[in-house]
């Protein structure tokens, strides 16, 4: 966990609580996947029943975990980072590499947020439904994907801003 995340300011406490809530909800979704898959295994093995809804629900839950849990994972430092080159670079080159990485991350996440919003709007307008047993209106999972990417973008921008502010304050000491 970053230092900023471990001691949120009064202004950041509500945001920090929402980030934690998104992580807890992703954890609950993970638990539900385990529960549904275990149920499906028992139903197939013991009762010779097939449950096609389990695959569909767990697929949507995996999307939920991936997108909604991303902001929590970012705050906790759980995203994969390869810093072999960065650690060996001189301080000035390290700052440039970190700035480039931040810029690329913001660009990629903003693009994903924009595209997922487009998918959501298209599915909302067309009222498109999945062609599966549950016939889910596709705007629902697309909305989750958009919210997750927008949430990740907000947390990413805030973390970059805090890091920049901390670096500037530290350079004056």
Image (cartoon, rainbow, N blue to C red):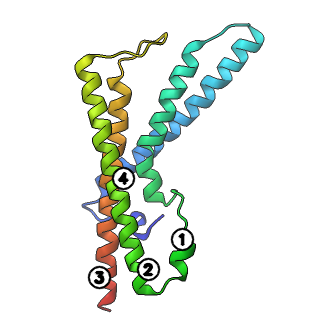
- Indicate the position of residue 46 as horizontal and vertical percent values: 77, 11
Which residue is nearer to you in this view: 88 or 169? 88
Say which quadrant the C terminus sits in. bottom left
Residue annotated with mark 2: 94
- Of pointers 3 and 1, the one earlier in the residue sequence: 1
User: What mark, if any, has residue 168 been given in the picture?
Assistant: 3
Q: Is residue 13 left or right of residue 69?
A: left
**In the picture shown, does residue 13 fall above or below 165?**
above
Residue annotated with mark 1: 83
Helix, strand or loop status at disc 1: loop
- Of pointers 2 and 4, the one earlier in the residue sequence: 2
**In the picture shown, does residue 81 fall above or below 117?**
below
**Contact? badges 4 and 3 (CB < 8 Å):** no
Whole-number angstrom distance, CA of label 1 to CA of label 2: 10 Å
Residue found at x 48% / y 58%:
76
Helix, strand or loop status at disc 2: helix
Residue annotated with mark 4: 108
Q: Quadrant of residue 22?
A: top left
**In the picture shown, does residue 29 fall above or below 152?**
above
């Amino acid at each position: 966990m970053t230092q900023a995340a471990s001691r949120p300011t009064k202004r950041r406490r509500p945001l920090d609580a929402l980030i934690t809530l998104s992580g807890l909800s992703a954890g609950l979704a993970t638990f539900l996947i385990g529960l549904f898959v275990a149920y499906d295994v028992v139903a197939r093995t013991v009762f010779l029943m097939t449950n096609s809804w389990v695959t569909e629900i767990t697929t949507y839950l995996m999307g939920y975990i991936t997108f909604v849990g991303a902001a929590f994972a970012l705050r906790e430092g759980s995203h994969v980072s390869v810093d072999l080159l960065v650690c060996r670079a001189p301080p000035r080159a390290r700052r440039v590499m970190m700035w480039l990485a931040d810029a690329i991350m913001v660009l990629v996440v903003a693009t994903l947020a924009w595209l997922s919003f487009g998918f959501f709007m298209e599915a909302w307008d067309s009222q498109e439904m999945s062609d599966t047993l549950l016939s889910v209106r596709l705007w629902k999972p697309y909305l989750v994907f958009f919210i997750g990417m927008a949430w990740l973008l907000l947390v990413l921008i805030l973390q970059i801003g805090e890091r920049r502010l901390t670096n500037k304050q530290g350079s004056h000491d």
